[in-house]
Amino acid sequence: MTGETSRTQPPRTQTPRTQTFGADLLAIARKTLQEEIAPHLSGDQRYQAAMVANACAIAARELETAPAARQAETACLEAAQSPSPAALCVAIRCGAHDADPRLHSALLRLSLIAAYRTRPGALRPAERGDVDALIKDQTK
Protein backbone atom coordinates (compact mmCIF):
# COMPACT_ATOMS: atom_id res chain seq x y z
CA MET A 1 0.00 0.00 0.00
CA THR A 2 1.16 3.49 -0.73
CA GLY A 3 -0.34 5.02 2.37
CA GLU A 4 -3.68 5.79 0.74
CA THR A 5 -6.71 4.54 2.52
CA SER A 6 -9.17 2.56 0.53
CA ARG A 7 -12.76 3.42 1.19
CA THR A 8 -15.45 1.09 0.10
CA GLN A 9 -18.94 2.38 -0.25
CA PRO A 10 -22.02 0.21 -0.39
CA PRO A 11 -23.53 -0.16 -3.84
CA ARG A 12 -26.23 2.37 -4.62
CA THR A 13 -29.62 0.79 -4.92
CA GLN A 14 -32.93 2.28 -5.98
CA THR A 15 -35.12 1.95 -2.95
CA PRO A 16 -38.49 3.55 -2.36
CA ARG A 17 -36.77 6.08 -0.07
CA THR A 18 -34.27 7.25 -2.70
CA GLN A 19 -37.08 7.55 -5.22
CA THR A 20 -39.07 9.63 -2.77
CA PHE A 21 -35.98 11.74 -2.07
CA GLY A 22 -35.62 12.48 -5.80
CA ALA A 23 -39.31 13.37 -6.01
CA ASP A 24 -38.89 15.62 -2.97
CA LEU A 25 -35.96 17.42 -4.60
CA LEU A 26 -37.99 17.99 -7.74
CA ALA A 27 -40.88 19.35 -5.67
CA ILE A 28 -38.54 21.80 -3.93
CA ALA A 29 -37.08 22.88 -7.28
CA ARG A 30 -40.57 23.36 -8.70
CA LYS A 31 -41.74 25.39 -5.72
CA THR A 32 -38.63 27.58 -5.87
CA LEU A 33 -39.11 28.16 -9.58
CA GLN A 34 -42.79 29.00 -9.19
CA GLU A 35 -42.56 31.13 -6.06
CA GLU A 36 -39.13 32.75 -6.20
CA ILE A 37 -38.08 32.94 -9.86
CA ALA A 38 -41.17 33.01 -12.10
CA PRO A 39 -42.76 36.07 -10.45
CA HIS A 40 -39.76 38.11 -11.61
CA LEU A 41 -40.10 36.97 -15.22
CA SER A 42 -42.44 38.05 -17.96
CA GLY A 43 -43.58 36.97 -21.39
CA ASP A 44 -41.81 34.00 -22.95
CA GLN A 45 -39.48 33.54 -19.99
CA ARG A 46 -42.41 33.20 -17.59
CA TYR A 47 -44.05 30.67 -19.94
CA GLN A 48 -40.79 28.71 -20.18
CA ALA A 49 -40.47 28.70 -16.39
CA ALA A 50 -44.02 27.32 -16.15
CA MET A 51 -43.11 24.54 -18.63
CA VAL A 52 -40.03 23.63 -16.58
CA ALA A 53 -42.10 23.60 -13.38
CA ASN A 54 -44.64 21.30 -15.04
CA ALA A 55 -41.83 18.99 -16.22
CA CYS A 56 -40.52 18.85 -12.63
CA ALA A 57 -43.97 17.84 -11.39
CA ILE A 58 -44.32 15.10 -14.01
CA ALA A 59 -40.81 13.76 -13.30
CA ALA A 60 -41.54 13.70 -9.56
CA ARG A 61 -44.76 11.76 -10.13
CA GLU A 62 -42.89 9.32 -12.40
CA LEU A 63 -40.35 8.65 -9.65
CA GLU A 64 -43.12 8.29 -7.10
CA THR A 65 -45.12 5.82 -9.21
CA ALA A 66 -42.29 3.82 -10.78
CA PRO A 67 -42.57 0.76 -8.49
CA ALA A 68 -46.37 0.62 -8.83
CA ALA A 69 -46.11 1.00 -12.61
CA ARG A 70 -43.56 -1.83 -12.84
CA GLN A 71 -45.84 -4.05 -10.75
CA ALA A 72 -48.87 -3.19 -12.90
CA GLU A 73 -46.97 -3.88 -16.11
CA THR A 74 -45.76 -7.22 -14.74
CA ALA A 75 -49.34 -8.07 -13.75
CA CYS A 76 -50.49 -7.32 -17.30
CA LEU A 77 -47.85 -9.58 -18.81
CA GLU A 78 -48.58 -12.36 -16.31
CA ALA A 79 -52.34 -12.13 -16.82
CA ALA A 80 -51.90 -12.42 -20.57
CA GLN A 81 -49.07 -14.92 -20.31
CA SER A 82 -47.15 -12.61 -22.62
CA PRO A 83 -43.36 -12.40 -22.88
CA SER A 84 -43.22 -8.65 -23.58
CA PRO A 85 -45.31 -5.49 -23.79
CA ALA A 86 -45.00 -5.55 -27.60
CA ALA A 87 -46.31 -9.12 -27.78
CA LEU A 88 -49.17 -8.20 -25.46
CA CYS A 89 -50.15 -5.28 -27.71
CA VAL A 90 -50.24 -7.56 -30.74
CA ALA A 91 -52.36 -10.12 -28.89
CA ILE A 92 -54.81 -7.46 -27.71
CA ARG A 93 -55.14 -6.04 -31.23
CA CYS A 94 -55.91 -9.54 -32.49
CA GLY A 95 -58.65 -9.97 -29.88
CA ALA A 96 -56.83 -12.69 -27.97
CA HIS A 97 -57.76 -11.20 -24.59
CA ASP A 98 -61.25 -9.83 -25.09
CA ALA A 99 -63.28 -10.09 -21.89
CA ASP A 100 -60.27 -11.06 -19.76
CA PRO A 101 -61.11 -9.56 -16.33
CA ARG A 102 -57.65 -10.09 -14.83
CA LEU A 103 -55.92 -8.36 -17.73
CA HIS A 104 -58.56 -5.63 -17.77
CA SER A 105 -57.91 -4.90 -14.09
CA ALA A 106 -54.13 -4.77 -14.58
CA LEU A 107 -54.44 -2.53 -17.65
CA LEU A 108 -56.77 -0.22 -15.74
CA ARG A 109 -54.21 0.13 -12.93
CA LEU A 110 -51.49 0.87 -15.48
CA SER A 111 -53.61 3.49 -17.27
CA LEU A 112 -54.56 5.19 -13.99
CA ILE A 113 -50.88 5.47 -13.08
CA ALA A 114 -50.08 6.91 -16.52
CA ALA A 115 -52.89 9.47 -16.20
CA TYR A 116 -51.75 10.39 -12.70
CA ARG A 117 -48.25 11.06 -13.98
CA THR A 118 -49.26 13.54 -16.66
CA ARG A 119 -52.66 14.94 -15.62
CA PRO A 120 -53.62 13.99 -12.07
CA GLY A 121 -56.44 16.53 -12.11
CA ALA A 122 -58.15 14.52 -14.84
CA LEU A 123 -58.73 11.64 -12.43
CA ARG A 124 -61.90 11.35 -10.39
CA PRO A 125 -61.37 11.37 -6.61
CA ALA A 126 -61.95 7.60 -6.40
CA GLU A 127 -59.40 6.97 -9.17
CA ARG A 128 -56.91 9.25 -7.44
CA GLY A 129 -57.48 7.24 -4.26
CA ASP A 130 -56.76 4.03 -6.18
CA VAL A 131 -53.45 5.42 -7.43
CA ASP A 132 -52.56 6.71 -3.95
CA ALA A 133 -53.20 3.20 -2.58
CA LEU A 134 -51.02 1.62 -5.28
CA ILE A 135 -48.19 4.02 -4.47
CA LYS A 136 -48.57 3.44 -0.73
CA ASP A 137 -48.49 -0.35 -1.23
CA GLN A 138 -45.14 -0.04 -3.03
CA THR A 139 -43.48 2.09 -0.35
CA LYS A 140 -44.14 -0.32 2.54
Image (cartoon, rainbow, N blue to C red):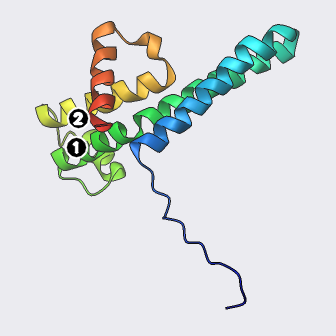
CA–CA distance between discs 2 and 1?
6 Å
Q: In the figure, residue 95 lies in which quadrant? A: top left
Residue 79 appears in the rendering? yes
Residue 37 horizontal/vertical position (percent): 80, 16
Q: Amino acid at mark 2?
A: Ala
| Label disc, if present, on residue 75 of the rendered structure | 1
**Which dot marks residue 63?**
none
Frontmost residue, 54 versus 82: 54
Residue at 18%, 37% (x, y): give it: 103
Q: Which residue is mark 2?
A: 106
Is 92 situated above or below 8? above
- Residue closest to the eye, 14 or 45: 14
Residue 100 makes an appearance in the image: no
In percent of width and height, residue 101 lies at 12, 31
Disc 1 element:
helix
Q: Is residue 89 left or right of residue 51?
A: left
Inspect the image, locate mark 1, and give the three-letter code of the amino acid beneath it.
Answer: Ala
